[in-house]
Amino acid sequence: MAMIFTRKEVGALAGRAVTAESMGVTSTKNYDEQVCAVGDRSALSNYPYFIEMSAGAVHSGRIDSHGLLPRVFTDDTENYTVYWGDEALAMQAEYSVHEGWK
């Protein structure tokens, strides 16, 4: 199941206007999203992730202590897939071989 909300829709749900500036983010892109993993924070902290954007960009790393992945900025609406745990590590390894990551 997936749900997609614009900034304005999130603001309406929260009862306030939400802008990039109000979130402390400066970007020239039209869209931004940030995944928040929900669960036991101590178990999620430092858990590996790999985000594969439909346009080909990738983001990878480890979940922070607040359960947040990095904010992703795009010019147009775009689909993405998030891989977790062992799948994320496998995607990181595969991508590094194909793209020459060190």
Image (cartoon, rainbow, N blue to C red):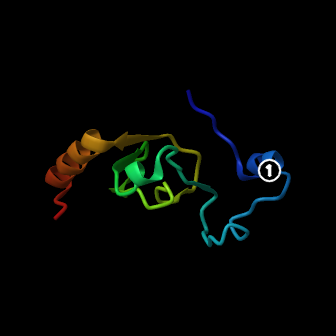
Q: Nearer the viewer, residue 78 or 24?
A: 24
Residue placed at 23% from the left, 47% from the top?
89
Quarter of the figure that contains the C terminus: bottom left
Residue 92 image point, x, y percent:
24, 50
Residue 66 image point, x, y percent:
51, 59
Identify the residue under disc 1: 14
Residue placed at 35% from the left, 41% from the top?
83
**Which amino acid, by three-letter code, is at mark 1?**
Ala
In the orientation shown, which residue stands out farthest toward the right?
15
Residue 73 image point, x, y percent:
54, 59
Q: Nearer the viewer, residue 10 or 76?
A: 10
Residue 97 image point, x, y percent:
14, 52
Count of numbered marks: 1
In the orientation shown, which residue stands out farthest toward the top?
1
Q: Nearer the viewer, residue 1 or 95?
A: 1
Horizontal side of residue 39 vs 57, given as left or right: right
Q: Under tag 1, what secondary structure?
A: helix
Residue placed at 68% from the left, 65% from the top?
20
